[in-house]
Amino acid sequence: MRRGDEREAEFETFFVEQYDAVAQSVRFVCGDAERANDATQEAFIRAYARWNRIRRYDNAGAWVRRIAINISRDAHRADTRRSRREERAAPPIPSSPHQVDDHSSVLDLLEKLPERQRAVAALYYLDDMAVAEISTVLDIAEGTVRFHLSEAHARLREHLDRRQQRAR
């Protein structure tokens, strides 16, 4: 087998083993399945282009996950900027008075969190990652992960308590 063929086979194995887990993590972090899939595909394309270097990493999957999360954040920021420009250009549209605040799905609960808290909570609670792994994936200090996890936990607890009180 030629060296290029070995490289291709090695990357294909890596891709098959990691794709679903990375895509799921990014979906939890960004809350948008389509954006998550796009970001995950782009991250794997970048990994393939740099595979000779990345394959030597202790955790190449964490590198791809971090890149995919960054791509999804960049896309979210671009969408937000575009939306703001469109809002300034268009007349305001009245919002519905019957907005539902009582969400039942985990993703809906996570959407209530600020971006960094949502990312940390999703990776911790849904992907069952350790603080050290989250630190690597998000490229932040472990203490920062613990802080955001604590803040996310408190906010989620408040929301669930309010929801329980309304149900009584």
Image (spheres, rainbow, N blue to C red):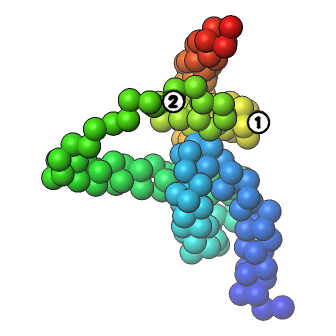
Residue 154 can be seen in this image: no
* SS class, disc 2: loop
Q: CA distance from mark 1 to mark 2?
A: 30 Å
- Up the image or down, 24 lies above or below 142; here it is below
* SS class, disc 1: loop
Number of the label disc, if any, that sits on residue 128? 1
Q: Quadrant of the C terminus?
A: top right
Given the image, on which type of amino acid does mark 1 rest? Asp
Query: Which residue ends up furthest to the bottom in the rendered image?
Result: 2
Q: Nearer the viewer, residue 91 or 119?
A: 91
Residue under the point 78% across and 68% down:
16
Q: Residues within 10 Å of mark 2 (few under 14, many from 20)?
A: few
Query: Which residue ends up furthest to the right in the rendered image?
Result: 1
- Up the image or down, 1 lies above or below 27; here it is below
| Left or right placement of residue 86 versus residue 106 in this view | left
- Up the image or down, 130 lies above or below 160; here it is below
Coordinates of residue 108 in the picture (x, y in percent): 59, 35
Residue 123 can be seen in this image: yes
User: Which picture quadrant has residue 23?
Assistant: bottom right
CB atoms of marks 1 and 2 within 8 Å: no
Q: Residues within 10 Å of mark 1 (few under 14, many from 20)?
A: few
- Up the image or down, 112 lies above or below 27; here it is above
Residue under the point 60% across and 30% down:
103
| Left or right placement of residue 75 versus residue 149 in this view | left
Q: Quadrant of the N terminus?
A: bottom right
Q: Nearer the viewer, residue 118 or 15?
A: 118
Given the image, on which type of amino acid does mark 2 rest? Val
Residue under the point 54% across and 64% down:
38
| Left or right placement of residue 2 versus residue 46 in this view | right
Number of the label disc, if any, that sits on residue 100? 2
Coordinates of residue 133 in the picture (x, y in percent): 69, 38
Of labels 1 and 2, the one closer to you = 2
